[in-house]
Image (tube, coloured by chain):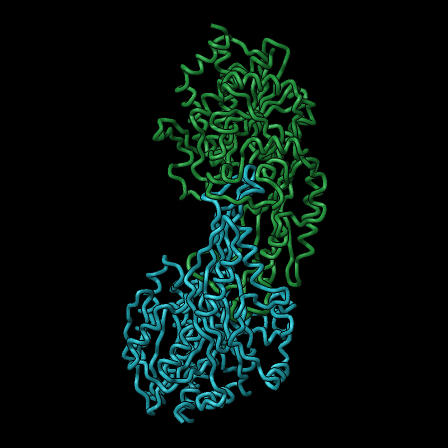
Chain colours: A green, B cyan
Amino acid sequence: MSQLDAVLAHIDDNLDASLERLFAFLRIASISTDPAHRDECRRAAEHVRAELAGLGFTADVHATPGHPVVLGATAGRADTRVLFYGHYDVQPVDPLELWNTQPFEPQLETLADGSKLIRARGAADDKGQILTFLEAVRAWKAVTGALPVGVTVLIEGEEEVGSVNLPAFVDAHLENLRADAVLVCDTNRWDDDTPAITTGLRGLVHDEIVIRTADRDLHSGLFGGAAQNAVHVLAQVIAALREADGRIAVPGFYEGVPEVPEDVRAQWRGLGLDAQTFLGPVGLSVPAGEKDRDVIEQIQSRPAFDINGIIGGYTGEGSKTVIPAEASAKITFRLVGDQNPANVRDAFRAFVRRLIPADASVTFGSGDGAPAVSVPLDSPWLAKASRALADEWGRRPVTIGGGGSIPIIATLKHALGAEPLLVGFGLEDDRIHSPNEKYTLKSFHKGARSWARILQALAE
Amino acid sequence: MSQLDAVLAHIDDNLDASLERLFAFLRIASISTDPAHRDECRRAAEHVRAELAGLGFTADVHATPGHPVVLGATAGRADTRVLFYGHYDVQPVDPLELWNTQPFEPQLETLADGSKLIRARGAADDKGQILTFLEAVRAWKAVTGALPVGVTVLIEGEEEVGSVNLPAFVDAHLENLRADAVLVCDTNRWDDDTPAITTGLRGLVHDEIVIRTADRDLHSGLFGGAAQNAVHVLAQVIAALREADGRIAVPGFYEGVPEVPEDVRAQWRGLGLDAQTFLGPVGLSVPAGEKDRDVIEQIQSRPAFDINGIIGGYTGEGSKTVIPAEASAKITFRLVGDQNPANVRDAFRAFVRRLIPADASVTFGSGDGAPAVSVPLDSPWLAKASRALADEWGRRPVTIGGGGSIPIIATLKHALGAEPLLVGFGLEDDRIHSPNEKYTLKSFHKGARSWARILQALAE
């Protein structure tokens, strides 16, 4: 039996223990966006540090102005060193009443076909994915006493809130972060049978629009028809941000958006990802974006605008005849290519300001952002990982051109001069920002096996 | 000293005791829209019944499918009988943090100029106004042992939620409600020195728009650009409901809206109610309604559309990159003239349905409504009340052509064949649906004196 086969067998034989470790991690309610969960974020960081120490890493928890960062390192047989990045923080859980189980009491569920799911907030995003990597490291250490390559692990606690404190941390710890490649396990595979390597990540701009009108909520019987309504102004602003054809109406917004070559588009069309395949599983059928773009373009190579939440006026039970004096919406832009987050934010704000009528004012939120990032298709790390994944899954991985944003990847790429390698095992129906988040046991198990193979391949 | 002078002197001499009675009423948190306050609505009804019984009325609390109704009656010297209508229910108090005092712990505040305010939810709408009438009744009974006219009192608990159960109650108790005039104290005076009689009330349609898209909230990184966003759809619908010139875009909406004669408009303009006077005190300056109408027309003789509240997606602290699958808005239309509430509701819903794109669906709320109501300017009751008010205030009352809605007035007018007489003592800055609601001590005191005079005038 080769070393690798022994490592893979160890992963198979110890799956229950791996799962126990994942459940312990999932029980920590590390919601980064909610100040009430600050202590649990700290606990999650300590938990990761202890896990790394148990695997023979030198590891520390580093305070930041927000939630702490965990940094650990261990040597490998080869000179090659990889930096593994992940995040211990998770999304909020509301609306809690839509969960069938408690979000921080992980369950292993067996489906009718005998397959199993891990159900919990963070199961897929990103605690389960982090542990696919750490369990591969554990198996290599247990079976051979060492790793094929040197490994540095960076686990942060603010990915879900824009990684606002990580760039400064990276700058301050450049020497300890040096690596030949940056491994990230926070993306999806193509489908249940097909692995994927993500070669492009959309960038992100977060902002909030807050509209204020009168100095108090007004009685609509007395003032209706004469007083400016904050919700009305906000709705008009939101409606104006998109054209009827789905394009975003902000002047200059599309600056830096590259056109995908026709041969690549043809290749995408060959993947068979039509609207029904992509949208059908979530109850939709018609792509809502730019009308002249296929659904695969809309999600891979085009920027997007979404309202993430809106609130204003009376939202309790029954009715209340007020004219709201304040209304707000949280928004995000997804960026591609060379779109500049600061320019997008500024153009967006200028556009909104021009729409504000008399007797209304607007303020904005953080306006934080991160640019899109792409991985060259001829990266040697990509080729090595691709072979390892093909060995595990029995078919070559699909290279995915776009998707969600991981704000820090661009920073790491530029600060370290190292190419990212994005290999994840999630599935589109993992409900990662929704109630009832899950990660399949297959994702977890074959994810760990995949990383065991990749660690060896990277040393070759 | 005439009987009336003795009654007025009694009101003056017993003002502190009147205020104590009002405070006891204000301490009951009878918020009708919130099921959690059901018992307090019941308590408020019992409180009113006990007050009426103490004044020598035969009075009962009648159960309804919603909150109970109080009905009481007492004889008068003349054959004339009036029905006094009011409501013991109050608006919700949120946002509670904007109150400077507890909403159900009434305070008497003294301003820098020495004038005094009663501060509490319901102080003006409608508990304070109800008690102006009952304290006038009390003084007449105390001083003369009888009332100039027979008085029936109808106090309901669902005015703030559309009086949904009152029409059936009125039908079932027609004989006990028979009266020559319907007195209502739920409107404003013109300004601090000038009384008013309201001769027109705008009607009302309440509804809710609920938009649903995907079968769950989606991750905007994965689905952004391809998936329909419920907040976006809702914002587009709301924005489309009004034209750029302020007109409501629903086809047929203006059917039944009468044009005010030029001489009446000229008279209104003579009142000096310009935009600055009306909107300035609440921090606004530009009338937001139909651009070709004066502010006095916008609030008196024109229909209006308002969004009372909106909610969808993530509204907690921080950010969450979801595409919301549901969003909803509460809306009201204010109606004038012969606009038919059911027709307006149906036309509105048809208009909205036509705007719903693929992958979105819409449902609506109750769609309850009441038509506008107007009082003929040549009503004999109006002439009598007008003289009584002039005697009290030293100037003739202004007749106000429009304003808020009191859903049941049209029902009472048609069921009983009796003209309404709307005399109220509120002021526009009473914040009646907002935090820090108040009623001036002057409104309360001179309100009671005004009713004492009107009761005598109606018998003449």
Q: Which percent across, then down, holds residue B84?
A: 38, 80
Q: Quadrant of residue A102?
A: top left
Quick check: A168 above or below B311?
above
Q: Which percent across, then down, holds residue B292?
A: 64, 73
Is residue A117 left or right of B112 when viewed as pictured?
left
Residue A35: tell me if it is visible: no
Quick check: A244 above or below B161?
above
Residue B228: tell me if it is visible: yes
Q: Residue lying farthest top?
A: A1
Q: Quadrant of residue A84?
A: top right
Residue at 39% of width from left, 32% of height from top?
A105
Residue at 55% of width from left, 77% of height from top?
B301
Q: Which percent across, then down, holds residue A375?
A: 65, 26
Q: Quadrant of the C terminus of chain A?
A: top right
Front-most of residues B393 and B195: B195
Quick check: A286 above or below A152?
below
Residue at 50% of width from left, 10% of height from top?
A4
Number of numbered discs overlaid on the protein picture: 0
Q: Which percent across, then down, holds residue B346?
A: 46, 66
